Amino acid sequence: MSTLSDLVHAQGCLTDNDVEWLHRLASDGQLLADLSSADIVIWVATNDGSFVAVAHARPSGAATLFYRDIVGEGVRQQWHTQVRGAFDSGKIVDSSSPDWFEETPTRLRAVPIVRERGKDGNPPPVIGVLTRHSNLGETRTPSRQQITFDECANDLFRMIASSEFPDPAAPTSPRRGAPRASDGLIRIDVDGITTFASPNALSAFNRMGFDDELEGESLAEVTTRILPSTRQVDESLPVVVTGRAPWRTDIEARGVTVSLRAIPLKDHGTRIGAIILCRDVSELRHQEQELITKDATIREIHHRVKNNLQTVASLLRIQARRTHSDEARDALSQAMRRVDAIAVVHDTLAQGLTQTVDFDEVFHRVLKLVAEVAAAPNTRARTMSTGHFGVLPSEYATPLALALTEVVTNAVEHGLAGKEGTVTIDAVRTDEKLHVSVHDTGHGLPEGRIGQGLGTQIIRTLIQGELGGSIEWRGSEGEGTDVLIDIPMRWLKK
Protein backbone atom coordinates (compact mmCIF):
# COMPACT_ATOMS: atom_id res chain seq x y z
CA MET A 1 0.00 0.00 0.00
CA SER A 2 1.33 3.44 -0.94
CA THR A 3 2.17 5.82 1.89
CA LEU A 4 1.11 9.44 2.06
CA SER A 5 4.65 10.47 1.08
CA ASP A 6 4.62 8.14 -1.94
CA LEU A 7 1.29 9.48 -3.14
CA VAL A 8 2.26 13.12 -2.65
CA HIS A 9 5.72 12.80 -4.21
CA ALA A 10 4.14 11.06 -7.20
CA GLN A 11 2.48 14.37 -8.05
CA GLY A 12 5.84 16.17 -7.93
CA CYS A 13 4.39 19.57 -7.06
CA LEU A 14 5.06 19.88 -3.31
CA THR A 15 8.19 20.48 -1.27
CA ASP A 16 9.46 18.27 1.55
CA ASN A 17 8.18 20.87 4.04
CA ASP A 18 4.74 20.65 2.43
CA VAL A 19 4.78 16.85 2.75
CA GLU A 20 5.79 17.09 6.41
CA TRP A 21 2.91 19.52 7.02
CA LEU A 22 0.45 17.09 5.40
CA HIS A 23 1.87 14.27 7.55
CA ARG A 24 1.23 16.30 10.68
CA LEU A 25 -2.29 17.13 9.59
CA ALA A 26 -3.02 13.51 8.65
CA SER A 27 -1.88 12.38 12.11
CA ASP A 28 -4.73 14.48 13.52
CA GLY A 29 -7.23 13.24 10.95
CA GLN A 30 -8.83 10.91 13.49
CA LEU A 31 -9.33 13.79 15.92
CA LEU A 32 -11.02 15.89 13.22
CA ALA A 33 -13.19 12.96 12.16
CA ASP A 34 -14.31 12.27 15.74
CA LEU A 35 -15.01 15.93 16.51
CA SER A 36 -17.07 16.43 13.36
CA SER A 37 -18.61 12.91 13.32
CA ALA A 38 -17.71 12.74 9.65
CA ASP A 39 -15.19 11.23 7.25
CA ILE A 40 -12.09 13.35 6.72
CA VAL A 41 -10.15 13.12 3.44
CA ILE A 42 -6.98 14.97 2.42
CA TRP A 43 -6.47 15.72 -1.29
CA VAL A 44 -3.49 17.02 -3.26
CA ALA A 45 -3.56 18.43 -6.78
CA THR A 46 -2.46 16.23 -9.69
CA ASN A 47 -0.56 17.26 -12.78
CA ASP A 48 -3.73 17.03 -14.91
CA GLY A 49 -5.61 19.56 -12.77
CA SER A 50 -7.59 17.07 -10.71
CA PHE A 51 -7.02 15.81 -7.15
CA VAL A 52 -6.02 12.51 -5.52
CA ALA A 53 -6.82 11.35 -1.98
CA VAL A 54 -3.68 10.84 0.13
CA ALA A 55 -5.20 10.29 3.60
CA HIS A 56 -8.57 9.27 5.07
CA ALA A 57 -9.92 9.01 8.62
CA ARG A 58 -13.27 7.48 9.57
CA PRO A 59 -15.25 8.73 12.59
CA SER A 60 -15.19 6.37 15.56
CA GLY A 61 -18.59 7.49 16.87
CA ALA A 62 -20.60 7.66 13.65
CA ALA A 63 -21.19 5.65 10.48
CA THR A 64 -18.61 6.06 7.73
CA LEU A 65 -19.58 6.92 4.19
CA PHE A 66 -16.62 5.11 2.68
CA TYR A 67 -16.63 1.39 3.37
CA ARG A 68 -13.90 0.91 0.74
CA ASP A 69 -10.50 2.54 0.91
CA ILE A 70 -10.57 5.89 -0.89
CA VAL A 71 -6.85 6.67 -0.59
CA GLY A 72 -5.21 6.78 -4.01
CA GLU A 73 -8.47 7.52 -5.84
CA GLY A 74 -9.21 10.68 -7.78
CA VAL A 75 -11.79 13.21 -6.62
CA ARG A 76 -15.32 12.43 -7.75
CA GLN A 77 -17.03 14.79 -10.14
CA GLN A 78 -19.71 15.66 -7.60
CA TRP A 79 -17.03 16.98 -5.19
CA HIS A 80 -14.74 18.60 -7.74
CA THR A 81 -16.42 22.03 -7.70
CA GLN A 82 -16.01 22.51 -3.94
CA VAL A 83 -12.49 21.04 -3.82
CA ARG A 84 -11.31 23.14 -6.75
CA GLY A 85 -13.00 26.23 -5.29
CA ALA A 86 -11.22 25.84 -1.94
CA PHE A 87 -7.91 25.15 -3.64
CA ASP A 88 -8.11 28.19 -5.93
CA SER A 89 -9.63 30.70 -3.49
CA GLY A 90 -7.87 29.66 -0.28
CA LYS A 91 -11.23 29.85 1.50
CA ILE A 92 -13.55 27.26 3.05
CA VAL A 93 -16.28 26.15 0.63
CA ASP A 94 -19.50 24.38 1.73
CA SER A 95 -21.89 22.53 -0.56
CA SER A 96 -25.03 24.60 -1.14
CA SER A 97 -27.38 21.63 -0.89
CA PRO A 98 -27.24 18.03 0.29
CA ASP A 99 -25.38 15.69 -2.01
CA TRP A 100 -26.17 12.02 -2.54
CA PHE A 101 -23.44 9.44 -2.16
CA GLU A 102 -24.46 5.81 -2.74
CA GLU A 103 -28.08 6.58 -1.79
CA THR A 104 -27.01 8.45 1.36
CA PRO A 105 -27.60 12.20 1.73
CA THR A 106 -24.35 13.97 2.60
CA ARG A 107 -22.95 17.44 3.02
CA LEU A 108 -19.45 18.45 1.98
CA ARG A 109 -17.10 21.04 3.41
CA ALA A 110 -13.82 21.74 1.59
CA VAL A 111 -11.04 23.37 3.61
CA PRO A 112 -7.86 24.71 1.97
CA ILE A 113 -4.67 23.44 3.59
CA VAL A 114 -2.29 26.35 4.06
CA ARG A 115 1.24 25.96 5.43
CA GLU A 116 2.34 29.58 5.43
CA ARG A 117 0.64 32.90 5.04
CA GLY A 118 0.74 34.89 1.82
CA LYS A 119 3.39 37.58 1.46
CA ASP A 120 3.13 41.14 0.14
CA GLY A 121 -0.64 41.00 0.02
CA ASN A 122 -0.69 37.86 -2.13
CA PRO A 123 -3.09 34.99 -1.30
CA PRO A 124 -1.53 32.19 0.74
CA PRO A 125 -0.19 29.18 -1.18
CA VAL A 126 -2.56 26.21 -0.84
CA ILE A 127 -0.85 22.80 -0.69
CA GLY A 128 -3.96 20.63 -0.56
CA VAL A 129 -7.60 20.41 0.42
CA LEU A 130 -9.25 18.72 3.39
CA THR A 131 -12.86 17.60 2.95
CA ARG A 132 -15.41 16.75 5.60
CA HIS A 133 -18.12 14.33 4.43
CA SER A 134 -21.08 14.44 6.83
CA ASN A 135 -23.69 11.69 6.78
CA LEU A 136 -27.11 13.39 6.88
CA GLY A 137 -28.93 10.06 6.93
CA GLU A 138 -28.27 9.72 10.67
CA THR A 139 -29.22 13.29 11.58
CA ARG A 140 -30.70 13.59 15.05
CA THR A 141 -31.07 16.31 17.64
CA PRO A 142 -27.48 17.09 18.64
CA SER A 143 -26.48 16.90 22.27
CA ARG A 144 -24.53 19.66 24.00
CA GLN A 145 -21.43 17.54 23.67
CA GLN A 146 -21.90 17.13 19.92
CA ILE A 147 -22.54 20.86 19.50
CA THR A 148 -19.29 21.60 21.35
CA PHE A 149 -17.42 19.00 19.33
CA ASP A 150 -18.72 20.58 16.11
CA GLU A 151 -17.62 24.03 17.29
CA CYS A 152 -14.15 22.69 18.09
CA ALA A 153 -13.95 21.03 14.66
CA ASN A 154 -15.00 24.25 12.91
CA ASP A 155 -12.38 26.21 14.86
CA LEU A 156 -9.72 23.75 13.74
CA PHE A 157 -10.93 23.86 10.12
CA ARG A 158 -10.64 27.65 10.18
CA MET A 159 -7.13 27.36 11.65
CA ILE A 160 -6.15 24.87 8.90
CA ALA A 161 -7.20 27.44 6.30
CA SER A 162 -5.10 30.14 7.99
CA SER A 163 -1.92 28.06 8.52
CA GLU A 164 -2.46 27.91 12.32
CA PHE A 165 -3.07 24.16 12.54
CA PRO A 166 -1.27 21.85 12.83
CA ASP A 167 1.20 23.69 15.03
CA PRO A 168 4.82 22.94 14.05
CA ALA A 169 5.82 23.33 17.73
CA ALA A 170 3.65 20.37 18.76
CA PRO A 171 5.31 17.01 19.50
CA THR A 172 5.38 14.80 16.42
CA SER A 173 5.51 11.43 18.18
CA PRO A 174 2.87 11.07 20.87
CA ARG A 175 3.44 8.53 23.60
CA ARG A 176 1.43 5.35 23.59
CA GLY A 177 -2.02 6.11 24.96
CA ALA A 178 -2.32 9.63 23.49
CA PRO A 179 -5.78 11.02 24.37
CA ARG A 180 -8.60 11.07 21.81
CA ALA A 181 -11.77 13.15 21.67
CA SER A 182 -13.91 10.27 22.92
CA ASP A 183 -11.61 9.72 25.92
CA GLY A 184 -12.37 13.14 27.35
CA LEU A 185 -12.51 16.72 26.08
CA ILE A 186 -12.34 19.99 28.00
CA ARG A 187 -12.77 23.38 26.37
CA ILE A 188 -11.34 26.41 28.14
CA ASP A 189 -11.54 30.11 27.30
CA VAL A 190 -8.66 32.50 26.91
CA ASP A 191 -8.45 32.92 30.72
CA GLY A 192 -8.21 29.16 31.30
CA ILE A 193 -11.78 28.82 32.63
CA THR A 194 -13.54 25.58 31.69
CA THR A 195 -16.55 26.22 29.46
CA PHE A 196 -17.26 22.56 28.71
CA ALA A 197 -16.15 19.19 30.08
CA SER A 198 -17.31 15.91 28.55
CA PRO A 199 -18.53 13.17 30.93
CA ASN A 200 -15.38 11.11 30.37
CA ALA A 201 -13.17 14.10 31.14
CA LEU A 202 -15.07 14.83 34.34
CA SER A 203 -14.83 11.17 35.38
CA ALA A 204 -11.06 11.20 34.87
CA PHE A 205 -10.68 14.19 37.19
CA ASN A 206 -13.12 12.67 39.70
CA ARG A 207 -10.93 9.58 39.94
CA MET A 208 -7.99 11.83 40.79
CA GLY A 209 -9.92 13.37 43.70
CA PHE A 210 -11.81 16.33 42.25
CA ASP A 211 -15.44 15.98 43.43
CA ASP A 212 -17.05 19.10 41.96
CA GLU A 213 -18.03 20.25 38.47
CA LEU A 214 -15.24 21.35 36.14
CA GLU A 215 -17.27 23.93 34.22
CA GLY A 216 -16.71 27.44 35.51
CA GLU A 217 -13.49 26.40 37.24
CA SER A 218 -9.94 27.33 36.32
CA LEU A 219 -8.38 24.11 35.05
CA ALA A 220 -4.97 25.21 36.32
CA GLU A 221 -6.34 25.74 39.84
CA VAL A 222 -8.21 22.42 39.78
CA THR A 223 -5.03 20.62 38.77
CA THR A 224 -3.05 22.36 41.50
CA ARG A 225 -5.57 21.29 44.16
CA ILE A 226 -5.61 17.60 43.23
CA LEU A 227 -1.85 17.12 42.80
CA PRO A 228 0.01 15.99 45.93
CA SER A 229 2.20 18.78 47.30
CA THR A 230 5.14 16.40 47.58
CA ARG A 231 5.05 15.31 43.95
CA GLN A 232 7.43 16.92 41.49
CA VAL A 233 5.44 18.67 38.75
CA ASP A 234 6.34 18.38 35.07
CA GLU A 235 7.46 21.83 33.89
CA SER A 236 5.15 21.55 30.86
CA LEU A 237 2.03 21.11 33.01
CA PRO A 238 1.22 24.84 33.51
CA VAL A 239 1.29 25.63 29.79
CA VAL A 240 -0.83 22.57 29.02
CA VAL A 241 -3.64 23.19 31.53
CA THR A 242 -3.81 26.86 30.53
CA GLY A 243 -3.87 25.95 26.84
CA ARG A 244 -0.96 28.24 26.01
CA ALA A 245 1.15 25.68 24.14
CA PRO A 246 0.44 22.64 21.94
CA TRP A 247 2.02 20.16 24.33
CA ARG A 248 1.38 16.92 26.18
CA THR A 249 1.93 15.91 29.78
CA ASP A 250 0.74 13.46 32.42
CA ILE A 251 -0.75 14.22 35.84
CA GLU A 252 -0.97 11.65 38.61
CA ALA A 253 -2.98 11.64 41.83
CA ARG A 254 -4.44 8.89 44.02
CA GLY A 255 -2.78 6.24 41.86
CA VAL A 256 -4.53 7.50 38.72
CA THR A 257 -2.55 8.84 35.76
CA VAL A 258 -4.27 11.07 33.20
CA SER A 259 -2.62 12.11 29.97
CA LEU A 260 -3.37 15.65 28.78
CA ARG A 261 -2.93 17.19 25.35
CA ALA A 262 -3.50 20.90 24.76
CA ILE A 263 -4.53 22.33 21.38
CA PRO A 264 -4.55 26.15 21.49
CA LEU A 265 -7.37 27.74 19.49
CA LYS A 266 -6.49 30.89 17.56
CA ASP A 267 -8.29 33.39 15.38
CA HIS A 268 -5.83 35.02 12.97
CA GLY A 269 -3.02 34.83 15.49
CA THR A 270 -5.06 35.78 18.55
CA ARG A 271 -5.53 33.05 21.16
CA ILE A 272 -9.22 32.51 21.92
CA GLY A 273 -9.02 29.44 24.15
CA ALA A 274 -7.97 25.82 23.90
CA ILE A 275 -9.06 22.22 23.63
CA ILE A 276 -7.69 19.92 26.34
CA LEU A 277 -7.91 16.22 25.51
CA CYS A 278 -7.56 13.86 28.46
CA ARG A 279 -7.36 10.12 28.93
CA ASP A 280 -6.97 7.82 31.89
CA VAL A 281 -3.75 5.96 31.08
CA SER A 282 -3.12 4.43 34.50
CA GLU A 283 -2.99 0.88 33.17
CA LEU A 284 -0.81 1.83 30.19
CA ARG A 285 1.71 3.67 32.37
CA HIS A 286 1.72 0.74 34.79
CA GLN A 287 2.52 -1.60 31.91
CA GLU A 288 5.25 0.73 30.67
CA GLN A 289 6.78 0.83 34.15
CA GLU A 290 6.70 -2.95 34.31
CA LEU A 291 8.49 -3.14 30.96
CA ILE A 292 11.12 -0.67 32.14
CA THR A 293 11.63 -2.74 35.29
CA LYS A 294 11.87 -5.95 33.27
CA ASP A 295 14.37 -4.35 30.88
CA ALA A 296 16.50 -3.22 33.79
CA THR A 297 16.30 -6.70 35.34
CA ILE A 298 17.29 -8.38 32.08
CA ARG A 299 20.22 -6.01 31.61
CA GLU A 300 21.34 -6.70 35.18
CA ILE A 301 21.13 -10.45 34.52
CA HIS A 302 23.28 -10.09 31.40
CA HIS A 303 25.75 -7.99 33.39
CA ARG A 304 26.01 -10.61 36.12
CA VAL A 305 26.32 -13.45 33.60
CA LYS A 306 29.14 -11.53 31.92
CA ASN A 307 30.89 -11.05 35.27
CA ASN A 308 30.52 -14.75 36.11
CA LEU A 309 31.85 -15.79 32.71
CA GLN A 310 34.83 -13.49 33.09
CA THR A 311 35.48 -15.03 36.49
CA VAL A 312 35.41 -18.50 34.90
CA ALA A 313 37.78 -17.30 32.18
CA SER A 314 40.14 -15.90 34.83
CA LEU A 315 40.14 -19.22 36.69
CA LEU A 316 40.91 -21.06 33.44
CA ARG A 317 43.74 -18.63 32.73
CA ILE A 318 45.22 -19.20 36.20
CA GLN A 319 44.90 -22.95 35.79
CA ALA A 320 46.54 -22.82 32.36
CA ARG A 321 49.53 -20.95 33.79
CA ARG A 322 49.98 -23.48 36.58
CA THR A 323 49.76 -26.63 34.49
CA HIS A 324 52.94 -28.34 33.27
CA SER A 325 51.31 -30.10 30.31
CA ASP A 326 51.41 -28.25 26.99
CA GLU A 327 48.33 -30.13 25.79
CA ALA A 328 46.38 -29.24 28.95
CA ARG A 329 47.56 -25.63 28.75
CA ASP A 330 46.31 -25.34 25.14
CA ALA A 331 42.97 -26.91 26.02
CA LEU A 332 42.46 -24.54 28.95
CA SER A 333 43.43 -21.51 26.85
CA GLN A 334 40.94 -22.50 24.16
CA ALA A 335 38.21 -22.94 26.75
CA MET A 336 39.07 -19.52 28.18
CA ARG A 337 38.67 -17.86 24.75
CA ARG A 338 35.32 -19.57 24.21
CA VAL A 339 34.03 -18.34 27.54
CA ASP A 340 35.33 -14.82 26.80
CA ALA A 341 33.54 -14.81 23.44
CA ILE A 342 30.21 -15.58 25.11
CA ALA A 343 30.92 -12.93 27.77
CA VAL A 344 31.36 -10.28 25.04
CA VAL A 345 27.79 -10.87 23.82
CA HIS A 346 26.34 -10.65 27.32
CA ASP A 347 28.33 -7.48 27.99
CA THR A 348 26.84 -5.90 24.86
CA LEU A 349 23.31 -6.95 25.85
CA ALA A 350 23.80 -5.47 29.32
CA GLN A 351 24.34 -2.04 27.76
CA GLY A 352 21.22 -1.88 25.57
CA LEU A 353 17.46 -1.76 25.97
CA THR A 354 16.66 -4.52 23.46
CA GLN A 355 17.59 -8.16 23.10
CA THR A 356 19.48 -7.48 19.88
CA VAL A 357 23.13 -6.65 19.40
CA ASP A 358 25.21 -4.76 16.88
CA PHE A 359 27.27 -7.74 15.82
CA ASP A 360 29.90 -5.61 14.09
CA GLU A 361 30.80 -4.20 17.51
CA VAL A 362 30.73 -7.68 19.05
CA PHE A 363 32.98 -9.14 16.36
CA HIS A 364 35.45 -6.26 16.69
CA ARG A 365 35.84 -7.19 20.36
CA VAL A 366 35.99 -10.91 19.52
CA LEU A 367 38.95 -10.31 17.22
CA LYS A 368 40.89 -8.94 20.18
CA LEU A 369 40.59 -12.37 21.83
CA VAL A 370 42.63 -13.83 18.98
CA ALA A 371 45.48 -11.36 19.59
CA GLU A 372 47.00 -13.63 22.23
CA VAL A 373 47.11 -16.51 19.76
CA ALA A 374 48.54 -14.27 17.04
CA ALA A 375 51.33 -13.26 19.43
CA ALA A 376 52.67 -16.83 19.67
CA PRO A 377 56.41 -17.35 18.99
CA ASN A 378 57.38 -17.41 15.28
CA THR A 379 53.84 -16.32 14.26
CA ARG A 380 53.06 -12.86 12.89
CA ALA A 381 49.38 -12.74 12.04
CA ARG A 382 47.27 -9.77 11.07
CA THR A 383 43.47 -9.79 11.08
CA MET A 384 41.29 -7.67 8.80
CA SER A 385 37.51 -7.36 8.88
CA THR A 386 35.39 -6.02 6.03
CA GLY A 387 31.69 -5.89 5.26
CA HIS A 388 28.73 -5.57 7.58
CA PHE A 389 27.06 -8.06 9.94
CA GLY A 390 24.29 -5.76 11.16
CA VAL A 391 22.00 -6.22 14.15
CA LEU A 392 21.29 -9.78 15.27
CA PRO A 393 19.02 -11.29 17.95
CA SER A 394 20.89 -12.32 21.06
CA GLU A 395 20.07 -16.00 20.63
CA TYR A 396 21.96 -16.01 17.32
CA ALA A 397 24.72 -13.59 18.27
CA THR A 398 26.14 -15.93 20.90
CA PRO A 399 26.62 -19.04 18.71
CA LEU A 400 27.90 -16.95 15.78
CA ALA A 401 30.43 -15.15 17.97
CA LEU A 402 31.64 -18.43 19.40
CA ALA A 403 31.84 -20.09 15.96
CA LEU A 404 33.78 -17.21 14.42
CA THR A 405 36.16 -17.19 17.38
CA GLU A 406 36.91 -20.85 16.65
CA VAL A 407 37.31 -20.28 12.90
CA VAL A 408 39.63 -17.28 13.24
CA THR A 409 41.62 -18.94 16.04
CA ASN A 410 42.13 -22.05 13.89
CA ALA A 411 43.22 -19.89 10.96
CA VAL A 412 45.87 -18.15 13.10
CA GLU A 413 46.90 -21.10 15.24
CA HIS A 414 47.10 -23.73 12.52
CA GLY A 415 46.99 -21.96 9.16
CA LEU A 416 49.65 -19.35 10.04
CA ALA A 417 51.61 -21.34 12.62
CA GLY A 418 55.27 -20.34 12.51
CA LYS A 419 54.93 -17.83 9.65
CA GLU A 420 53.74 -14.37 8.74
CA GLY A 421 50.31 -13.92 7.14
CA THR A 422 46.89 -12.34 7.09
CA VAL A 423 43.41 -13.52 8.09
CA THR A 424 40.62 -11.64 6.33
CA ILE A 425 37.00 -11.86 7.48
CA ASP A 426 34.35 -10.53 5.10
CA ALA A 427 30.62 -10.31 5.92
CA VAL A 428 27.91 -9.73 3.33
CA ARG A 429 24.31 -9.44 4.50
CA THR A 430 21.32 -9.58 2.14
CA ASP A 431 17.60 -10.10 2.62
CA GLU A 432 18.07 -13.83 2.07
CA LYS A 433 21.22 -14.73 3.99
CA LEU A 434 24.29 -13.68 5.94
CA HIS A 435 27.47 -14.80 4.13
CA VAL A 436 30.77 -14.81 6.02
CA SER A 437 34.09 -15.79 4.46
CA VAL A 438 37.32 -16.26 6.41
CA HIS A 439 40.49 -16.41 4.31
CA ASP A 440 44.02 -16.98 5.56
CA THR A 441 47.30 -16.89 3.64
CA GLY A 442 48.71 -19.80 5.61
CA HIS A 443 49.75 -23.38 5.00
CA GLY A 444 46.41 -24.57 3.62
CA LEU A 445 44.71 -27.88 4.20
CA PRO A 446 46.99 -30.90 3.92
CA GLU A 447 45.62 -32.92 0.99
CA GLY A 448 42.41 -30.88 1.34
CA ARG A 449 41.45 -32.70 4.54
CA ILE A 450 39.43 -30.95 7.22
CA GLY A 451 40.50 -31.28 10.82
CA GLN A 452 38.50 -33.54 13.13
CA GLY A 453 39.35 -31.81 16.40
CA LEU A 454 37.06 -30.38 19.04
CA GLY A 455 37.16 -26.90 17.46
CA THR A 456 35.84 -28.18 14.12
CA GLN A 457 33.07 -30.13 15.86
CA ILE A 458 32.07 -27.02 17.82
CA ILE A 459 31.96 -24.94 14.63
CA ARG A 460 29.75 -27.46 12.81
CA THR A 461 27.39 -27.79 15.77
CA LEU A 462 26.96 -24.03 16.14
CA ILE A 463 26.59 -23.13 12.44
CA GLN A 464 24.52 -26.09 11.29
CA GLY A 465 22.62 -26.96 14.46
CA GLU A 466 22.13 -23.64 16.25
CA LEU A 467 21.88 -21.32 13.23
CA GLY A 468 20.54 -23.66 10.54
CA GLY A 469 23.35 -22.61 8.21
CA SER A 470 26.08 -24.26 6.19
CA ILE A 471 29.88 -24.20 6.36
CA GLU A 472 32.49 -25.22 3.82
CA TRP A 473 36.28 -25.43 3.95
CA ARG A 474 38.25 -24.85 0.75
CA GLY A 475 41.96 -24.84 0.12
CA SER A 476 44.98 -26.94 -0.65
CA GLU A 477 48.38 -27.33 0.94
CA GLY A 478 50.51 -24.22 0.56
CA GLU A 479 47.71 -22.04 -0.84
CA GLY A 480 45.85 -20.93 2.25
CA THR A 481 42.34 -21.80 3.40
CA ASP A 482 38.88 -20.33 2.85
CA VAL A 483 36.02 -21.00 5.25
CA LEU A 484 32.61 -20.09 3.81
CA ILE A 485 29.62 -19.71 6.14
CA ASP A 486 26.03 -19.08 5.00
CA ILE A 487 23.21 -18.41 7.48
CA PRO A 488 19.63 -18.03 6.16
CA MET A 489 18.01 -14.76 7.19
CA ARG A 490 14.74 -16.54 7.95
CA TRP A 491 16.42 -17.67 11.16
CA LEU A 492 17.62 -14.18 11.98
CA LYS A 493 14.17 -12.59 11.46
CA LYS A 494 12.38 -14.67 14.08
Image: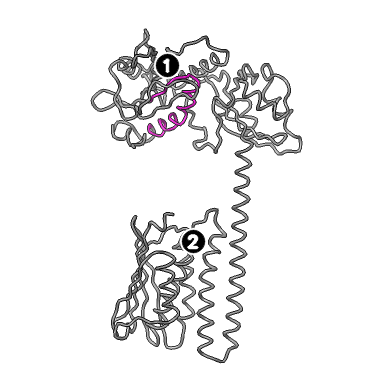
**Alpha-carbon distance for marks 2 and 1?**
53 Å
Is 444 drawn above or below residue 464 in the view shown? below
Is 139 drawn above or below residue 17 in the view shown? above
The three-letter code of the residue at mark 2 reads: Glu
Range shown magenta: 18-41
**Label 2 or label 1, whichever comes before in sequence order:** 1
Badge 1 is on which residue?
134
Check whether the beta carbons of the residues at disc 2 and disc 1 lie within 8 A of each other: no
The kind of secondary structure element at disc 1 is strand
* Percent x, y of residue 95: 37, 11
* Percent x, y of residue 90: 37, 18
The three-letter code of the residue at mark 1 reads: Ser
Q: Is residue 2 left or right of residue 168?
A: left
Residue 483 falls inside the magenta stretch:
no
Q: Residue 465 appears in which quarter of the rendering?
A: bottom left
* Percent x, y of residue 454: 45, 80
Q: Quadrant of the N terminus?
A: top left
Q: Quadrant of the C terminus?
A: bottom left
Q: Is residue 41 left or right of residue 221?
A: left
Q: Nearer the viewer, mark 2 or mark 1?
A: 2
Q: Is residue 307 left or right of residue 427?
A: right
Badge 2 is on which residue?
395
